[in-house]
Each structure stands twice: as structure tokens, then as C-alpha cells.
Image (spheres, grey):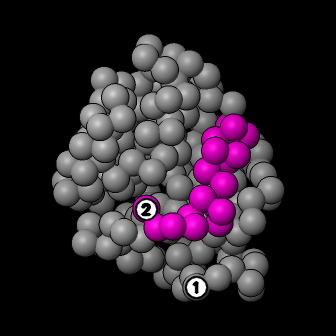
């Protein structure tokens, strides 16, 4: 659809996901605060890696909420659950091994689905978006957080790991979603919120 697909980060590069300074680049707690996540919500973290956002989400949804943490690499999920257990958060995080074509989420289950720096790596976007569409509740939100392609100052980032708002909107609108809200308050990333048509 007019863009290169980014390469998936292998589990052997997990140190990049937990790198020093990432918080000052991405402001994860501020980003999640903008999403108004409430205790008891059911949320999914797509491309969860070792839990950078899943652990934060687990705290936000509390003991009666759930976080479906999905990844296509079992090694990532194993480390994520070790991290969750260490922090006492393993009871409300459910690890899900996904594939390039199947997100493996239960239908009509999610209040919010987060894809942080993940969508640009999907090698079969229509299949993934179809699964996410099925997994969202009727008024659920799909949130894409992607490095801005429009920003030439984005540090150390290849174009295939960045997306424009126009490209994201184009692809998601062809797959049953509409753009309902945007935030441009992060240093380098868009926050794009989609709902089901």
C-alpha cells in the first residue's frame, strides 16, 4: 500500500526495548495517561516484547482488569512473564503467542488495543487488522503509536520504522476503522486512535 514494511526486532536485541533513555524519548506514562485507561478494563498490548508497556497497563487496569500481552516470539513472552512475576503483576497479564496472520485475541473482548511501534512491522496488515477488529468491543479503541514519518528530525530511525498519519489512516480505513482522535504531544511519535466503523 505504498510503504516498506519494517523488520521485526529479534528477541536477541531485547536490550533495545529496555534501553536507558527510552522513557525520555517516548514518555510512556504520559502517553498512557492520555488514553484514559480505567481499573477493570480489558486491554491488549500487541507486540508486547518483554513488557515495557504491558507492565504499566497491568498496574492501570488493576487486579480486576486484564492485559492480553501478544508477541510473535515466545522468547519475548517468557521474559515478559518473568518480569511480571518479579513485580507481582503476573495475575492479570495473559501472554498470547500470535503470528504474522493471527493476533489470537478472543472476539469482542477488548476495551482498548495498543500497538506501540508495532503496526509498521506487520507483514500482513489486513489479516492483523481483521483480528483486531473482531477482538474490539463495539466502542473499543485501537491505538497506534508510531514514530512520525513527517518529522525529519526523528533520531536514528529508518523510514520503514516510521509512519505518517495519512498512511495509517489510509490503511486502517480500508480495513473497517475510522480515525477518531490524534495526539501530537509526544516528542517523536503520533498517537492515533481508531474506532470500528
- Above or below, 44 against 80 in this view is above
Q: Earlier in the sequence, mark 2 or mark 1?
A: 2
Q: Residues within 10 Å of mark 2 (few under 14, many from 20)?
A: some
User: Is 126 on the left or on the right of 181, as rendered?
Assistant: left
Q: Residue at horizontal 57%, vertical 82%?
A: 157
Q: Which residue is mark 1?
A: 156
Q: Residue at horizontal 59%, vertical 74%?
A: 162
Q: Is residue 23 magenta?
A: yes
Q: Residues within 10 Å of mark 1 (few under 14, many from 20)?
A: few
Magenta segment: 18-35
Check the picture and name the quadrant holding the C terminus. top right
- Magenta part mainly helix, strand or loop? helix
Q: Quadrant of residue 152?
A: bottom right
Residue 125 x %, y %: 44, 61
Comparing 89 with 132, the one in front is 89
Distance from Cα at disc 2 to Cα at disc 1: 16 Å
Q: Residue at horizontal 26%, vertical 41%?
A: 81
Which-is-in-front pick, marks 2 and 1? 2
Q: Which mark is residue 18?
A: 2
Residue 92 x %, y %: 36, 25
Query: Is residue 167 visible from the viewing direction of this image?
Result: no
- Above or below, 111 against 24 in this view is above
Comparing 176 with 108, the one in front is 108
Amino acid at each position: 500500500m505504498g510503504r516498506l514494511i519494517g523488520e521485526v526486532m529479534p528477541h536477541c536485541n531485547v536490550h533495545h526495548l529496555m534501553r536507558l533513555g527510552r522513557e525520555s524519548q517516548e514518555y510512556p506514562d504520559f502517553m498512557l495517561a492520555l488514553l484514559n485507561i480505567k481499573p477493570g478494563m480489558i486491554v491488549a498490548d500487541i507486540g508486547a516484547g518483554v513488557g515495557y508497556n504491558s507492565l504499566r497497563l497491568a498496574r492501570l487496569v488493576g487486579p480486576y482488569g486484564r492485559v492480553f500481552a501478544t508477541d510473535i516470539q515466545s522468547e519475548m513472552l517468557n521474559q515478559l512473564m518473568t518480569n511480571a512475576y518479579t513485580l507481582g503483576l503476573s495475575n492479570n497479564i495473559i501472554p498470547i503467542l500470535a503470528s504474522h496472520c493471527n493476533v489470537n485475541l478472543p472476539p469482542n473482548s477488548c476495551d482498548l488495543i495498543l500497538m506501540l511501534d508495532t503496526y509498521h512491522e506487520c507483514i500482513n496488515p489486513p489479516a492483523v487488522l481483521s483480528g483486531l477488529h473482531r477482538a474490539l468491543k463495539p466502542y473499543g479503541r485501537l491505538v497506534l503509536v508510531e514514530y512520525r514519518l513527517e518529522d525529519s528530525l526523528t533520531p536514528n530511525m529508518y523510514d520503514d520504522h516510521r509512519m505518517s498519519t495519512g498512511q495509517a489512516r489510509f490503511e486502517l480505513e480500508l480495513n473497517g476503522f475510522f480515525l477518531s482522535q490524534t495526539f501530537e504531544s509526544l516528542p517523536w511519535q503520533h498517537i492515533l486512535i481508531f474506532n470500528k466503523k
